[in-house]
Image (cartoon, rainbow, N blue to C red):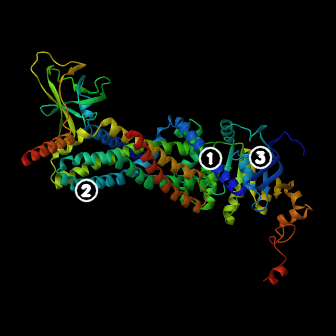
């Protein structure tokens, strides 16, 4: 009976201890941003690996998602004779939800897992230890530039995804299905609000940039430095990122619609 | 060194493309352009019923959007709806005796405020009030009226 | 133990446990400046852990580790990073940064900690590479190096900032006889030429005893013997004898703890 309570107690203490350590590391990493000010080169190098290298998959996916929205939206709207509103449907779906969420999920798979594996292998091959012994703080040198690069890159990737998606929807809706080009844009501009939709989308993408990059960086930094540990942590990175993004999306949407 | 340069250039392109995409979203996709057309002034109008009108709904004259609904509240004394509207500064010659009505764009479309210009020599200014208003047509009321009339006429026929 | 002023590192009453397994239970070690000190013991006695404790990467539960008279475990992070600039560590794997060339790896600590212009860094890096005989391999990536070369490159990196002390973690493990000879030669010449204090953690008796000035043997969380290589070799402790001469059975039994053999066979 008491064993049972002890078990609950122990696992909750473990949970909070882990959470606390993670938060302390997060704060240390954010403080480490200051050490990057004189060395923008470190951030640029990381933006290349998380941002530039994710660009192609984001652009292609955004284009296809936009085209699918064009097709599906048209088929639904045409029944109500409201196909003029296609632009609104495509733009709002992309800017509010699909842009930030799909980009974050693709980013977690493309950049997050790579980040995690890189840091995990650096740990497994004693490179992190080596940095410490060279009096180089791995939190400042390894974690901080990666996290910052992810936070900067994500909103840019999301914007590209949404923008390309709007053109994908245009291509299908206007060029293939014959929606009026003027209506597509003017309805969109009338209904998409800068503050409520665009800015909120950007806020979401910042939040997703923080959580997905942080999960990858943390899982790498704290993984068990064996090949099995690294492979498990890679899986965890993608699964946790996806769940966190979807959960956080619901929370943020609920807050923003309020 | 050349690889560093290539990385710098590609990151530069990446950032530029991202910012360009943000600008496209802001200018081409959203209504941000209507915010930057300079000054605007606020007028208000009371309606018995605004059903379905929302903040940011369009305010039009002859079908042209001249402003947006800023705020909707209930007058605590008369229990009428008070609609505050932002009108773009360049439309500063709307006569004070203009009337405002709430209409629907298409059968299922959005509600909007339509202003019918009057003929007075004075113009609406900041905080002016449009006195002549026509409330939104509530579909349920129309239908119930129609049914009521119908049954009345049926009754008459039977007599 | 006599308190000697020449000792660069003084460890007193060191206790360290990882979870429930006790790794050190009261270890005292003196590391004299400018000499080569070897710390030996069977695998799993926490030799690498000892180096990490000296480097301040982990903290002991009890005891002090004085470096230049200052206690490492009680240092603040900033101070610790200052002190680490005076230490170099050669990891078993080399721990070279895999995303940069040999040249950039050795330039790395210089670029991180000094404001030297690139031309001077180049000269320094080439000098260090010359010392370990890898001047021609400077453009290779770490993945293109053999194990022995990687360790030499790592050694060049460890001495890049001209530290006072180098910690060698199992420098000879898994090396062929030639690169083993090269490493022995290098460690000795580094020690002589640069006046470096060296700490070697190893279980390669022959090579280590050949270059060490002082030897510590640890087992089961305690120092079981120390002295010059000659003294260790002639020690009458059966345990040290077994370890140094590599006998299969002795105080450290060949068999892992088990029920008696006969009983086990007759069970069923």
Q: How many angstroms separate mark 3 from mark 2 (CA)? A: 65 Å
Circle 2 residues within 10 Å: few <14, some 14–19, many ≥20: some
Which one is earlier in the sequence, the residue at label 2 or at label 1? Answer: 1
Question: Of the residues tagged 1 and 3, which is closer to the observer?
Answer: 1
Position of residue C195 measured from the top left corner of the image (x, y, whole percent):
74, 44
Tag 1's secondary structure? helix
Q: Which residue is mark 2?
A: A72
- Name the residue carrying label 3: C61
Viewer-nearest of discs 3 and 2: 2
The residue where tag 1 is placed is A16
Q: CA distance from mark 1 to mark 3?
A: 23 Å
Could you say whether the residue bearing mark 2 is in a helix, strand or loop? Answer: helix
**Viewport quadrant of the C terminus of chain A:** top left
Q: Is residue C97 visible?
A: no
Q: Are discs 1 and 3 both within one chain?
A: no
Q: Quadrant of residue B103?
A: top left
Residue C129 located left or right of residue B112: right
């Amino acid at each position: 009976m008491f064993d049972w309570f002890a078990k609950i107690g122990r696992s909750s203490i473990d949970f909070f201890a882990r959470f606390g350590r993670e938060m302390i590391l997060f704060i240390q990493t954010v403080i480490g941003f200051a050490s990057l000010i004189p060395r923008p080169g470190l951030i640029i190098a990381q933006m290349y690996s998380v941002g530039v290298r994710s660009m192609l998959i984001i652009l292609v996916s955004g284009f296809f998602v936009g085209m699918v929205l064009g097709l599906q939206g048209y088929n639904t709207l045409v029944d109500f004779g409201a196909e003029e509103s296609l632009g609104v449907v495509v733009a709002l779906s992309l800017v509010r939800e699909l842009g930030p969420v799909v980009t974050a999920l693709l980013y977690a798979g493309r950049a997050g897992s790579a980040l995690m594996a890189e840091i995990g292998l650096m740990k497994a091959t004693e490179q992190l230890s080596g940095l410490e012994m060279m009096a180089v703080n791995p939190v400042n040198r390894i974690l901080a530039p990666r996290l910052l690069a992810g936070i900067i890159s994500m909103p840019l990737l999301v914007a590209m995804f949404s923008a390309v998606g709007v053109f994908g929807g245009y291509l299908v809706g206007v060029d293939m299905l014959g929606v009026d080009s003027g209506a597509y844009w003017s309805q969109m501009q009338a209904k998409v609000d800068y503050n409520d939709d665009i800015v909120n989308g950007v806020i979401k993408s910042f939040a997703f940039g923080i959580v997905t990059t942080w999960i990858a960086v943390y899982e790498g930094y704290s993984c068990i430095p064996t090949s099995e540990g690294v492979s498990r942590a890679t899986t965890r990175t993608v699964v946790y990122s996806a769940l966190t993004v979807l959960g956080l999306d619901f929370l943020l949407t609920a807050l923003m619609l309020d | 060194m050349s690889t560093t340069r290539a990385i710098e250039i590609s990151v530069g392109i990446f950032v530029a493309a991202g910012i360009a995409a943000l600008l496209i979203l802001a200018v081409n996709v959203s209504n941000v352009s209507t915010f930057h057309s300079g000054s605007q002034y606020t007028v208000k109008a009371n309606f018995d019923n605004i059903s379905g009108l929302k903040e940011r709904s369009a305010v039009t004259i002859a079908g042209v959007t001249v402003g947006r609904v800023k705020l909707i509240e209930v007058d605590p004394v008369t229990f009428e709806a008070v609609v505050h509207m932002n009108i773009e500064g360049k439309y500063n010659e709307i006569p004070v005796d203009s009337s405002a009505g709430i209409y629907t764009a298409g059968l299922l479309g959005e509600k909007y405020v339509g202003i019918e210009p009057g003929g007075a020599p004075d113009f609406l200014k900041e905080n002016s009030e449009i006195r002549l208003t026509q409330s939104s047509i509530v579909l349920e009321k129309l239908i119930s009226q129609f049914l009521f009339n119908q049954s009345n006429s049926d009754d008459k026929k039977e007599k | 133990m006599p308190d000697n002023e020449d000792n660069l590192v003084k460890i007193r009453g060191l206790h360290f446990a990882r979870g429930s397994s006790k790794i050190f239970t009261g270890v005292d070690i003196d590391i004299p400046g400018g000499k080569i000190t070897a710390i030996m013991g069977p695998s799993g006695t926490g030799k690498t852990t000892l180096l990490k404790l000296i480097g301040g990467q982990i903290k002991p539960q009890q005891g002090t580790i004085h470096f230049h008279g200052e206690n490492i475990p009680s240092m603040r992070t900033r101070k610790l990073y200052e002190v680490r600039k005076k230490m170099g560590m050669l990891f078993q794997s080399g721990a070279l940064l895999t995303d940069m060339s040999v040249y950039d790896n050795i330039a790395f600590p210089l670029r991180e900690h000094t404001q030297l212009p690139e031309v001077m860094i180049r000269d320094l890096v080439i000098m260090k590479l010359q010392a370990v005989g890898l001047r021609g391999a400077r453009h290779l990536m770490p993945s293109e190096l053999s194990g022995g070369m990687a360790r030499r490159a790592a050694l060049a990196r460890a001495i890049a900032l001209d530290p006072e002390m180098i910690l060698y973690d199992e420098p000879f493990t898994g090396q062929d006889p030639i690169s083993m000879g090269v490493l022995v030669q290098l460690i000795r010449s580094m020690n002589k030429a640069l006046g470096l204090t060296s700490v070697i953690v190893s279980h390669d008796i022959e090579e280590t005893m050949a270059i060490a000035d002082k030897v510590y043997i640890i087992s089961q969380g305690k120092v079981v013997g120390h002295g010059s290589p000659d003294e260790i070799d002639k020690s009458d402790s059966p345990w040290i004898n077994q370890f140094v001469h590599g006998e299969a059975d002795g105080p450290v039994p060949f068999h892992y703890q088990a029920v008696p053999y006969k009983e086990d066979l007759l069970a069923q």
